[in-house]
Image (spheres, grey):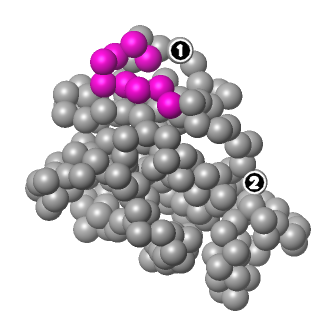
Amino acid sequence: MKVGLFFGSFNPIHVGHMVLANYMLEFTDLDRVWFVISPHNPLKKKASLLNERHRLQMVQIAVEDNSKLKASDAEFRLPQPSYTVNTLAHLKEKYPKNEFVLIMGEDNLGSFHKWKNYEEILKYHELYVYPRPEGIKTPLHLHKKVKLVNAPHMELSSTMIRTAIKEKKDIRYFIPAKVWEYIKEMHFYEK
């Protein structure tokens, strides 16, 4: 089975994430997409993140009606901060029959050469790269393991959503409906 790994903080998950995952399932050769919730991205401040269990719960709620989507807590049991190369080794050991592909934005491809052991990742895994406005062309765009995917572009971010919630704006259509209900019930991002 060919599984796309969509790494992120998902703080919170929003419709942009869902549209992209759906696109990858329907318009590429991926059989499944797993949302890999990062407890701590080395490039982000941990204090700004909602607890990883709550972020996992929101992703589980968002994907519960689609058997081709999965919320993964694979990084929760690995040393922190999380490095993709370690997560990939862990998943390959746990699911040896799966072929894992990284799903990433073009902006991340621009800094991919700074990732821990990025050459090792490229040796064994394809990267499915979707366009981002801040994406810059790099030599990696031409790498044989990099596949540019013409997914729809959405100007939506978790940061914008958190700010809007704090400002008491109604953003129910920006987030899967059941996730929006969970956020309201738990009073997340209000302060």
| Residue identifier under label 2 | 160
> Does residue 22 show up?
yes
Residue depicted at x 41% and y 26%: 147
Residue depicted at x 34% and y 16%: 143
- The answer to whether 118 is drawn above or below residue 80 in the figure is above
Residue depicted at x 14% and y 61%: 94
Q: Position of residue 44 (x, y in %)?
A: 51, 49
> Does residue 107 show up?
no
Disc 2 marks which amino acid? Met
Q: Nearer the viewer, residue 128 or 161?
A: 128
Residue 144 on the magenta segment: yes
The circle on residue 147 is: none
Q: Position of residue 36 (x, y in %)?
A: 39, 58
Q: Position of residue 189 (x, y in %)?
A: 70, 72
Q: Earlier in the sequence, mark 2 or mark 1?
A: 1
Front disc: 2 or 1: 1
The answer to the question of whether label 2 and label 1 lie on touching residues, with beta carbons closer than 8 A, is no
Image quadrant where residue 123 sits: top left
| Residue identifier under label 1 | 137
Mark 2: secondary structure: helix
Few, some or many residues within 10 Å of mark 1 (<14, 14–19, 20+) = few
Q: Is residue 10 left or right of residue 91?
A: right
- Give, as a single range, the part of the protein colored magenta: 141-149
Disc 1 marks which amino acid? Lys
Q: Nearer the viewer, residue 2 or 13?
A: 2
Q: Position of residue 133 (x, y in %)?
A: 68, 28
Q: Is residue 71 left or right of residue 181?
A: left
Image quadrant where residue 115 sits: top left
Q: CA distance from mark 2 to mark 1?
A: 26 Å
